[in-house]
Amino acid sequence: MKYIGLDVGGHTITAGAADFSQSPARLLRAETCAAPSPRTAENLVETAAALVLRLAENGEECFVGMGLPGFVAKDRKTAARLTNYENCDGLALGAMVERRLASLGLRAEAAIENDANCAALGEGMAGAAAGMEDYVVLTLGTGIGAGIVSGGRLVRGAHGMAAECGHMALCGAELTGCGCGGAGHLEEAASADWLERRAKAAGLPADFKKLWQMRAAPEASAMLSPALETLARGIVSVAVALDPEAVILSGGMSRAEGIAEELAERAQKYLPAPFRPYFRLKTSKLGGDAAVIGAASLYKSAA
Ligand SMILES: [Zn+2]
């Protein structure tokens, strides 16, 4: 059996074959391609199947775990809502990938899970959370995702939608643009995608990296500062709710130099005093590989 994980992003899709025979788990080989255009369910299934075929050797039976950017039902078969992809809501994407691979001559079992939950599993097996039983991974990228491990287990909730921290209502109801349909969400206040949209409207570079580099300039600071402050409140809210050993930042924004230190500093004033000695904000070293390894590891809990 070959274990293949996919990290499906809004802009790229990465697939990797993982080796769980030794500790820590590692990726043997990975392939990345651009997200399909248009981003429809059919195109997603086609792209995923093509990537899996490139990694499958000798037609060996595969387990395919897919980390998806959005809400995934607890059965790990059905997508409840993918905000960056069209017409996926309510579809059994795992079964669709299985059928497509079967039509191409490859036997496979597929499961789907939220991408940040996959990142949390991967960080625990091979990354910044190795050895921890209680931690949170926050993925700061196109959107804001999270995965929570408590008592050594991934927290999934009653419907599979636990840890959707990007949709915590930390802002007022005047923010109505979040792709999930709710108002006042952290993701709209502080994700790279939304910051870039606001930067573009203000005549600033629509690129988070460039915005971060010019953060000392008043016009960039006026845009970044409220977002970082909201993000710091989000991190503290998660820490206070869960009392983790560490909060681990992952995703494109987390790689901006000095951002973890800045967020940790902004977080201090919001933390209850008893939490301050224990508060640890770390940055992922595995990056996107964590979600790929975590997605491949879903075989361990597959029915
Ligand atoms: Zn939302």
Image (cartoon, rainbow, N blue to C red):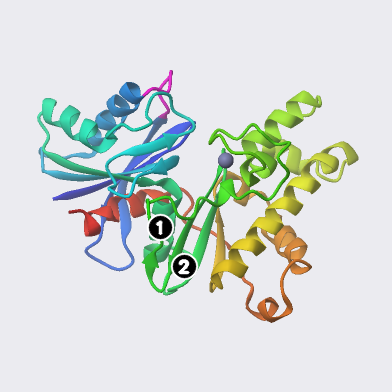
Asked whether residue 35 is in view, the answer is yes
| Foreground of the two, 16 or 189 | 189
| Lateral position of residue 212 relative to residue 11, left or right | right
Mark with earlier residue (1, 2): 2
Asked whether residue 53 is in view, the answer is no
| Lateral position of residue 283 relative to residue 124, left or right | right
Q: What kind of element bears circle 1?
A: loop
Q: What kind of element bears circle 2?
A: loop
Ligand 1 image position (quadrant): top right
Name the quadrant containing residue 199: top right
Residue at position x 53%, y 36% in the image: 180
Residue at position x 15%, y 40% in the image: 108
Boundaries of the magenta span: 34-40
| Foreground of the two, 205 or 38 | 38
Residue at position x 36%, y 64% in the image: 125
Secondary structure predominantly adopted by residues drawn in magenta = loop
Q: Could you tell me the amino acid type at mark 2?
A: Ala
- In the image, which is nearer the foreground, mark 1 or mark 2? 1
Instruction: Name the residue beneath numbered marker 2.
Output: 129
Residue 239: say if magenta: no
Question: Looking at the picture, how far across and down is residue 38, in whole percent?
Answer: 43, 18
| Lateral position of residue 10 relative to residue 223, left or right | left
Q: Is mark 2 within 8 Å of ligand 1?
A: no
Q: Could you tell me the amino acid type at mark 1?
A: Gly
Question: Looking at the picture, how far across and down is residue 143, in whole percent?
Answer: 56, 40
Instruction: Name the residue beneath numbered marker 1.
Output: 157
| Foreground of the two, 286 or 221 | 221
Question: Looking at the picture, how far across and down is residue 250, in whole percent?
Answer: 54, 53
Q: CA distance from mark 1 to mark 2?
A: 21 Å
Q: Residues within 10 Å of mark 2 (few under 14, many from 20)?
A: many
Figure quadrant of the C terminus? bottom left
